[in-house]
Structure formats: C-alpha cells, structure tokens
Amino acid sequence: MNTGTLINGLITGIIFGFLLQKGRVVRYDKQMGALRLKDMTILKFFFSAILTGMVGVQILHMLGIARPLILPANIGANIIGGLTFGLGWSIIGYCPGTSLGALGEGRTDAFWGILGMLFGAAAFAEVYPKFATSILTWGREGSITLPEIMSVNPWIVIVVFIGVGLALFRFLEKKGL
Amino acid sequence: METTDNKAWSPYVAGSLTGLVIIVSAWIAGNYFGASTCFVRVSGFIEQLFSPSKVATMDYFKWFGPKVDWQVMMVLGILIGAFISSLADGSFKVKAVPDMWAERFGPSPVKRSAFAFLGGIILMFGARMAGGCPSGYGLGAMVQLAVSGLIVVMCFFAGGIAFAQIIYRGGGSK
C-alpha cells in the first residue's frame, strides 16, 4: 500500500463526505425519514449514485480499464446479516459511512454509534469461526453478477435498473416524499 | 426543527456526482466503495494494543488485519469532507440528540448515546455477517451488477423499514 493510494483514498473520502453532507443524507432525521417512509432523500441520493456509477463502471470494465471486484453472494449470510443490519440501523439511524459524516457536521451521538460499531466489528471477529462453518456456508454462490445468472448483456440489466430508478424517482416526487 | 434549508443540494445532483466519484476511483485507484471493513481493521488495531498475541491468532483479523489502507483513509475523508461542507454553508451544529429522536424518545443525551451505541453494535455485527454495508454493497457491488449487492441492499431496507415501524409505532407524528 503506497502513499499515493492512501492520499487518493483520503481525497476520494473528502469529496464523498462533502457530497453526503451537501445532500443532507448524513443526518439521523433523513435516514430515519427513509426507514419510516416519510422522506426519501437518502434513497434518491443512493440510487442516483448507483445508476450513474453503473454506467461508468460498466464502460471501464468493457474497456479493461478497471478490474471487476465482485463481493461474493453468500445468500444465507447476506440475508441474515442484512436484516440484522436493518435492526441496528433503525436504532442508530446512521450507517457506517454516514456516521462519520454526521460526526463531521457536529452530531455527537454519532461518536457513540461509531464506538458501538467498533465493538460490533470486534464481536463479529470473535465469533467468526463459528459462523465460518455454519451461516457463512449457506448458499455460497461466489462472485456472480445479474447479467451472468440471467445470461443477458450487462447493458440490458443497466437499462432496466435505470428505467426502474426513474419510475421510482417520478413516483417519489409525485407523492412529495 | 429546520423548516427551510436553502443550502442543501438536490439529492439527485449530490448523488449523481457521487456516482462520478465512484467511477473515477475505480478508474484511478482500482478501488470500489466500502466502509465497514475499515471498522474491523480499526477494532483489530485497538484490540491489538491490549492483547497482541490474541489478535495475531484470530482468523478474522488475518483476513482484515489492522492496517491503514485506501478504505480507512476514504472513511476518514468522509469525516473531513462533511466537516468542511457543513462549516462552509453554516449547517455545522454541535448536537447530541437528533430532532426526530427527541420528539419520540425525549431529549436525554444519555439515552440517545446509549441507544446509538447499542444500535451501532447490532448494525456492524450484521454488516460483517452480510459482508459489507450500504457503501460496499450499494455503491460498490450494485454498480458492478453483483447479485450479492441487490440481495443485501434489499435486506438492509426491508429490515430497517420493518424495525423502524415497530420502534416508532404510536409516536413521533412528524
């Protein structure tokens, strides 16, 4: 890991944090607003980022400029862990990335949340060997992508995502969420 | 409660620009977004101060050992970026209890801090079991059309929405 990579990470994070704060998505009220289906600001931000990122990253992959790094599908752990995350998320009202942003804009409750997250990470490291032979082996499908399992061109999947995303945005704006 | 917030950017604009940052970081650094792995690294670093021999034998820290990498710096950058942005537009505010929380659960900072701590533990435990958080699975995996990303992001929201309904049942009108 060289210094250039670290500086690149820091600059990327500063821009990301700037945009998260400008979009006001780092706040508890916005995060909980989405989970309570009252204010979908974070969903608009999140999907705008994903849809834009999808197109560019796909081009980079096609041109061989960037190598894909696909997190494997471990379906059992993905579902159980994902729902457990949801429980914690509904209590803390920050996610790991935005908790740092919330602290950055002066929300001191995020500090205790971050401390809790560090404990949670340490606790998982502690029990990992037990899960490694149980939940983490359920539904191990490897680094699969949607176009692969559907045997279609990636652009078809991207066009569908964009279509669904735009319909969702339109719906949210109509409902004033 | 802030009623007007003229300095905020449209979430569509801020989100799309974030998408461009995702593309550029894949291009230049070959890295995809993620945030929860670095919590493992930092927790390993702290634990190492107390019992280095134990940390050295733990499998999970062999995978995600205590070290400073691109992601640790990126997450640190989020703190700095949000600080700069909030100072620049005057939205920086030292606040221990969020408005919506106070309305439902009262203004006690101790209570809010305790629940933020508890929620943080549960959330990170879940994130590590799932293999990542909204940054890693949403902004990192979904942009690459990964099956894992779609499953996990749906579970994050399904779990979060379901539990939020329970927690806020009967209170918090706004």
Image (cartoon, coloured by chain):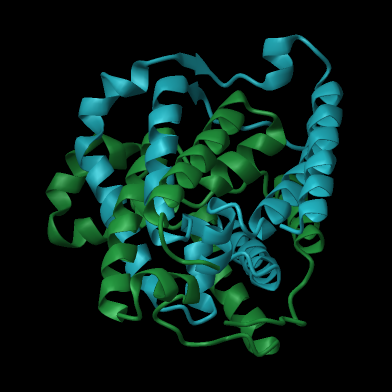
Chain colours: A cyan, B green
Query: Residue shown at 29%/51% (left/top)?
Result: A120
In the displayed structure, would residue B101 be above or below residue A66? below
Q: Quadrant of the C terminus of chain A?
A: bottom right
Query: Residue shown at 77%/44% (left/top)?
Result: A53
Where residue A154 appears, as percent x and y from the top left, is 81, 22
A146 sits left or right of A91 in the view: right
Q: Residue furthest top?
A: A151
**Residue B174 visible at all:** yes
Q: Nearer the viewer, residue A105 or B73?
A: A105
**Residue A59 visible at all:** no
Where residue A85 appears, as percent x and y from the top left, is 41, 44
Query: Residue shown at 64%/45% (left/top)?
Result: B139
Where residue B153 appears, as percent x and y from the top left, is 56, 38
**Image mark count:** 0
B33 sits left or right of B62 in the view: right
Where residue B83 appears, as percent x and y from the top left, is 58, 80
Q: Nearer the viewer, residue A53 or B161?
A: B161
In the displayed structure, would residue A39 be above or below residue A153? below
Q: Residue furthest front?
A: B170
Q: Nearer the viewer, residue B85 or B40?
A: B85
In the displayed structure, would residue A72 be above or below residue B131? above
Query: Residue shown at 80%/46% (left/top)?
Result: A171
